[in-house]
Amino acid sequence: MSVETLSIVFTGMSISLAAFYYISTLRNAQRTQQLTLETRQAQLFMQIYDRWSSIEMTKMEWELSNWEWDDFDDYVSKYDSDVESISLRSVLGRQFEGIGVLIKRGLIDPALVDDLMSASILGYWEKWGPVVKEWRVRRNIPQASEYQEYLYQTIKAIAEKQHTELET
């Protein structure tokens, strides 16, 4: 083999090794970036969940779950006439609205939300959904609580796949 042939073989091998190294580096960077994204999503969700797990939020959820009404007008007469009641429901609703937006935008994993909050989300919308839907009609605000409803639909689909006993 001549020096010229060795030079060509060596150059080819060098280019191949450089390409292999470049591809390996890119794959590692992509894995690191994905891991960073997943970690940030988990941290964001845990901040939400920490607030959700607070004594204050637990008391709010409990109190609201005990409210009873016959129809929308009965609900309004009992619970939509004072700032305290309106605020109580708004805080909880906004929590779910925010989670719904984050899921819709792909910022948190809906399966993670399902794992830790599905019972509360499903119970909340099943109780409050009819009130919200009537509120939309009467106030002509069709987008009111749209992400609460989106959250419910998303989590319900996941929960039904994971828990066949929930199917009706």
Image: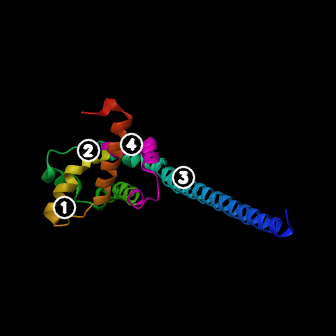
Mark found first going from the N terminus, 4 or 3 = 3
Q: Residues within 10 Å of mark 4 (few under 14, many from 20)?
A: many
Q: Nearer the viewer, residue 55 or 107?
A: 107
Identify the amino acid type marked 1: Arg
Spatial CA distance of label 2 from label 1 is 16 Å
Query: Badges 4 and 3: C-beta atoms under 8 Å apart?
Result: no
Q: Is residue 64 above or below residue 132?
A: above
Question: In this image, 117 relative to 146: left or right?
Answer: right
Q: Does the magenta stretch include residue 34?
A: no
Q: Is residue 106 magenta?
A: yes
Spatial CA distance of label 2 from label 3 is 27 Å
Mark number displayed over residue 42? 3
Query: Badges 3 and 1: C-beta atoms under 8 Å apart?
Result: no
User: According to the image, label 1 marks what residue?
Assistant: 136
Q: Give the range drawn in magenta.
A: 102-123
Q: Nearer the viewer, mark 4 or mark 1?
A: 4
Q: Magenta region, mostly helix, strand or loop?
A: helix
User: According to the image, label 4 marks what residue?
Assistant: 118
User: According to the image, label 2 marks what residue?
Assistant: 126
Mark found first going from the N terminus, 3 or 1 = 3
Q: Residue furthest front?
A: 1
Identify the amino acid type marked 4: Ser
